[in-house]
Amino acid sequence: MTSTERDAIARVAEAPMLDQVQHWAAINSGTGNLPGLARMAEALGAAFGALPGALELVRPEPAESMAANGVVNAIEHGRHLHLTVRPEAPVQMLFTGHMDTVYPADHPFQDQRFLDDNRLNGPGVADMKGGLAVLLAALNVVEASPPAERIGYEVVINSDEETGSLSSAKLLARAARGKVAALTYEPALPDGTLAGARGGSGNFSIVVKGRSAHAGRNPDEGRNAIVAASAIALRLIEAKSPALSVNPAKIDGGGPNNVVPDTAVLRVNFRPQSAEEIARASAHIEAAVRDVAASHEVKVSIHGGFNRPPKPIDPGAARLFDLVKAAGADLGLSIGWRATGGVCDGNNIAAAGVPVVDTMGVRGGAIHSAEEYLLVDSLAERAALSTLTILRIAEKGRP
Ligand SMILES: [Zn+2]
């Protein structure tokens, strides 16, 4: 390590990361809790506003959801934090995180407690308020280091990551443009292993409109929407392959036993591992819908799409991983990575052609459950890892 690096590493450990995590995790910021998200955005704005550059809270893009009765509703989202620092600097990076959690305002899991000296249990402490504290600590230290003038960056902290980033995907794609590398602050595994390749994900709501009739008097005049939706589900799972999982998850619709149901909504999730599988799945969905609409004499409309493209490890991403691994080795950390079926904003950033390591956050576990915990000693450790990674990218001009 250079003396600049050693100085920065020594300073980053002093950042008040645990206090910040506890402060931020005390604010409920479930994806649908707009007042909570507004308070969270304000708290993050105050903290990240200490960095140089222009900070704004960006209005969410319009997004829709499909109700159980087949009606499209607008979904409200919170504003996204967007910071732009030195856009004219020769080396440009992207840092992303999310301020939302999976716990709504009325969820029983709202409080924090220490399970032991090193494990803090609380909503969002690992996913990812801990990660946001790590990012802020690293950026503050980088700003105080001489290489800062070589590097510019954007920070995007969205409010809707946990529900698919529907209202922030365009902001992320714009912010990714022209960046040499991106770091995202999802939690690492408890042993520090990072996520490598990720499959993609697509969610669809397929609305079937049939015709209702009396189940006893004139059943043949009816066109049963639930039967047609089931037929579509059976057709869709035929698309399954080792590189594509297909999960028909739910069928909404129907009513009393003596009525032929005229409306059904089929929910289905696809997990493609490549762009080719997305194309194949898309063609399969269209064919299934066309055939069932014809044979069952129903009208079918398809809503949704592949909002998380697959994230393969290409040569650029492999170089970035190597740099993070080498930085870890200099800090006495052995950094491994492993493919995962989960998705996050790293998928969208990779789709923009930018190398990304998306688990630069804290070590922790049991995320998305009331057992979620943060390993407190990972705050300083991961902040050091980020600091060294960023300083070296600034120095080399690329990963
Ligand atoms: Zn997360």
Image (spheres, rainbow, N blue to C red):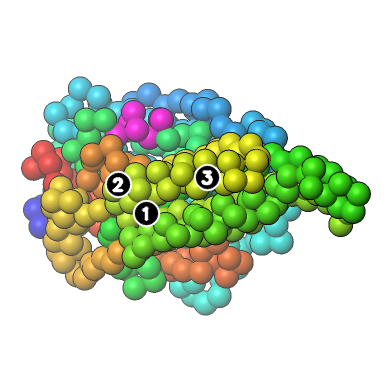
Secondary structure under tag 2 reads helix
Residue at horizontal 34%, vertical 65%? Answer: 242
Can residue 52 be seen from the camera position used here? no
Q: On the image, numbered disc 1 is attached to which residue?
A: 272
Q: Is residue 207 left or right of residue 161?
A: right
The part of the chain drawn in magenta is 170-176
Secondary structure under tag 3 reads helix
N-terminal of the two: label 2 or label 3? Answer: 2
Q: On the image, numbered disc 2 is attached to which residue?
A: 275
Foreground: disc 2 or disc 3: 3
Can residue 94 be seen from the camera position used here? yes
Foreground: disc 1 or disc 3: 3
In magenta stretch: residue 172 = yes
Cα gap from disc 1 to disc 3, whole angstroms: 23 Å
Q: Give the percent coordinates (x, y) of residue 309.
A: 35, 46
> Badge 1: few (under 14), some or many (20 or more) residues near its Cα, within 10 Å?
many
